[in-house]
Amino acid sequence: MNDQTDPLPLAGRRALVTGASSGIGRATARALAGAGASVHLVARREERLAELAEELGGDATFTAADVRDAGGVSTLFEGQAFDLVVANAGLSRGVAPLHEGDSDDWAEMIDTNVKGVLHTVRAALPALRAAGQGDLVLLGSVAGRQVYPGGNVYNASKHAVRAIYEALRLDEFGSGIRFTTVDPGLVETEFSLVRLGDQNAADSVYEGMTPLTPEDVADAIRYAVTRPPHVNIGEIVLWPTEQASTRDVHRSGH
Ligand code: NDP
Ligand code: 8X3
């Protein structure tokens, strides 16, 4: 009988986090490093990564890279054996209905949220397969479970992340690798500023309600990757208490 319930320590583990310059990725890097993992930070804004690496100290390292660039992502993993990879980099552009949508915005969302995740996963898998263990965490969203008006292409990209998660479970069955999709509702980060392009509009998304913090999501990721090796936390859906669906937000005013 397997009575192993001790958490898996993060000390000695080598993590890579994409989208580590802001929001959920930055909080996740802090949580993993704080628990003893050595963390490699990836995003495009190099100066932010440098600041975070300095804050984390120890053996934190960073590379400025764009996850849309398959070759660049592949290079990140050359000669490295990351055993904990968080494919978090992602974004949304706009809330226009499909018939008014901008095809450049569509391309950016699909290239980042879908192809960027695919590039990261493909580059991460050889070392994980060779080790016969490790964690691959994908940042999905409740937007990958429910659509909402104006969400269209972002929704499609996050539904794709969920499909990639499910496909990985089947394709890598027996490899010893654990796969997790973390699907939050509203989290106050730079996400809405990037999506709407205006700070007042971004602030109004969270007005009168208490959203999740990036640290809430990082805590869920830390929980998943520290379970004993025989336990795979597959899907984590986190809602703010005041959000019942992608369309129902209770704005109590506090
Ligand atoms: P932020 O905008 O705060 O952070 C997004 C991160 O992704 C940044 O570090 C950004 O870095 C990075 N990024 C974006 N495009 C690229 C790219 N092409 N190459 C490399 N890095 C990139 O948003 P969040 O922290 O909220 O978003 C993180 C993830 O969580 C996303 O996948 C998002 O879809 C998901 N999510 C967010 C929710 C929310 O309500 N905030 C809810 C559910 C899911 P840089 O610009 O420096 O490259
Ligand atoms: C981000 C959350 O509801 O704005 O994925 O799409 S939502």
Image: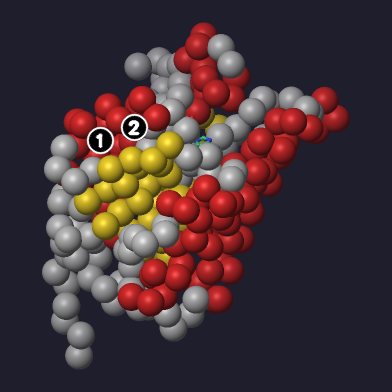
Residue at image coords 14%, 69%: 6
Tag 2 and tag 1, C-beta contact below 8 Å: yes
Residue type for callout 1: Ala
Q: Is mark 2 within 8 Å of ligand 1?
A: yes
Q: How many marks?
A: 2
Where in the figure is residue 152, as x and y percent of width and height?
72, 38
Residue at image coords 48%, 40%: 65
Compared across the picture, whether 29 is left or right of 113 comes to left
The residue carrying pointer 1 sits among few (fewer than 14), some (14 to 19) or many (20 or more) residues within 10 Å by Cα, namely many
Specify whether residue 154 is in view: no
Point out which mark residue 49 bears.
2
* The N terminus - image quarter: bottom left
For residue 188, which quarter of the picture?
top left
Reading the image, the residue beneath label 1 is 53
For residue 248, which quarter of the picture?
top right
Q: Residue furthest top?
A: 200
Residue type for callout 2: Leu
